[in-house]
Amino acid sequence: MSSIKRIGLVLSDVPGYSETFFRNKIKGLQENGFQVFLFVNQNQKKNIEFPCEIITAPNFNGSLVTKLTQIIQAFLKAVFVNAKQSYTLYKLDKQDGLSLKRRIKQVLLNQFLFKKKLDWLHFGFGMLAVNRENVANAIGAKMAVSFRGFDLYLSPLKHKECYNLLFSKKVHYHVLSNKMKTILIDKGITKTMVTVINPAIDVSFFQTQKRQQTNQRIEILTIARLHWVKGLEYTLQALALLKKEGLDFNYTIIGDGKEYERLVFAAHQLDIKEQVVFKGKISSKEVKKELDQTDIYIQYSIQEGFGNSPLEAQASGLLCIVSDADGLSENVIDTKTGWVVPKRNPLALANTIRMVTEMSLIDQQKIQENAINRMKNEFHINKQQQHFVRFYSEE
């Protein structure tokens, strides 16, 4: 490990205060002797406090004068400051059959990644590595790429064959679930080059007192951006079925997104608008308060790399119901720490919610205790940090 000290992490933007994953990862690496640099395509949070040095890419999309200035500066750096790295990148891209125009463009656009001497260059999302497949090699660093769900499952549908060149390179991959690892292996990636490191949470923050069964209405919660991939409309359909059966409930959705109006209208058409509350985006402290007031947590996604919110819900002692989408079936162990339901099946979801509400208090508490103990043992931040230390220590 002593020879691996400098990590370059590439993201689109500087993570905000609420995006704790990257902050915890960086702090854990620093505490274990690593030096970390954050490279971002843009920095919309320039005044935000961050635990490492931030290097921002030039803005090539401004006015004509600004654009020309940035191009000239990048060209001068390529010729006089980073000549060796630039020539190596140009040569490697040529070997891959890239056109002359594209080779020159990639040399200029990626100059900011040559600013530091690194042992590892780690792209935080799959699409950030596209058009940068040879940058790590050009600077003499090992290359790592994280896939988090959307970028592995949906991005290739929008950008066909976008990872073909990436998958031909020697890359160490970090994924969130064993399901994602299997997908990469099926695409021809060597098993030893794929490491599963699950998300982690501050378990102590989400600890709460055990809930007592009451005869009051059931409080149900989902935390998700308002996007079709989260399956919220299927959840609304399931709850509409239960309302017809006489179940008394409130359903709170925390999160914002472009599907807000459509989901509000769906709740109206399903005649459950009075039972559904859209909270929007709220702080972590407010999320904790909502969790403390909730009985059942639902994450009925169509696609989910793994999901932090179900972890937080289980740590809080909620009864959790999730879909079988991707990493969710590893997040929750069916009938042990919660329930896993086939996705896109509102009737199956409704039946599971009804079954959970009719369980005895003793059976509910057994599930809750299993979930809380598993969160404490498997998903705490320190364990995740040690996984990343080992990830970067591999030869």
Image (spheres, helix red, strand yellow):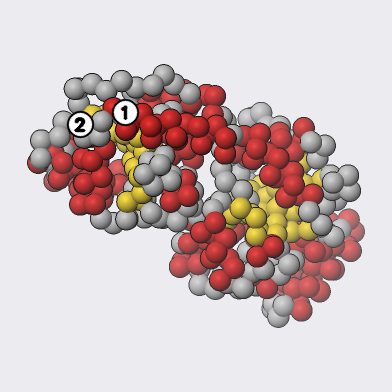
* Residue 148 position within the rendered picture, expressed as x and y whole percent measured from the top left: 54, 52
Residue 114: tell me if it is visible.
Answer: no
Q: Quadrant of residue 132?
A: bottom right
Quadrant location, the C terminus: bottom right
Of residues 277 and 369, the one nearer the viewer is 369
- Under tag 1, what secondary structure? helix
Q: Position of residue 86 (x, y in %)?
A: 82, 64
Tell me how far mark 1 sits from mark 2, CA to CA. Answer: 22 Å
Q: Which residue occupies 72% across, 50% down?
A: 391
- For mark 2, what is the residue? 249
Question: For mark 2, does the 10 Å Cα neighbourhood hold few (<14), some (14 to 19), or many (20 or more) residues?
Answer: some
- 333 sits left or right of 55 in the view: left
Position of residue 211 in the picture relative to residue 277 (left or right): right
The residue closer to the viewer here, 144 or 116, is 144
On the image, numbered disc 1 is attached to which residue? 362
Crowding at dot 1, Cα within 10 Å, few <14 / some 14-19 / many 20+, comes out as few
Relative to residue 279, is residue 5 drawn left or right?
right
Q: Residue at x 61, y 48 (%)?
A: 197
Q: Residue at x 52, y 24 (%)?
A: 205
Q: Closer to the camera, 307 or 163?
A: 307
Secondary structure beneath disc 2? Answer: strand
Type of residue at label 2? Phe
Q: Nearer the viewer, residue 99 or 320?
A: 320
Where is 262 relative to 214, above or below? below
Mark 1: amino acid:
Ile
Q: Is residue 52 visible?
A: yes
Q: Is residue 255 above or below residue 41?
A: above
User: Marks 1 and 2: which is nearer the front?
Assistant: 1
**Where is residue 220, by image quadrant?**
top left
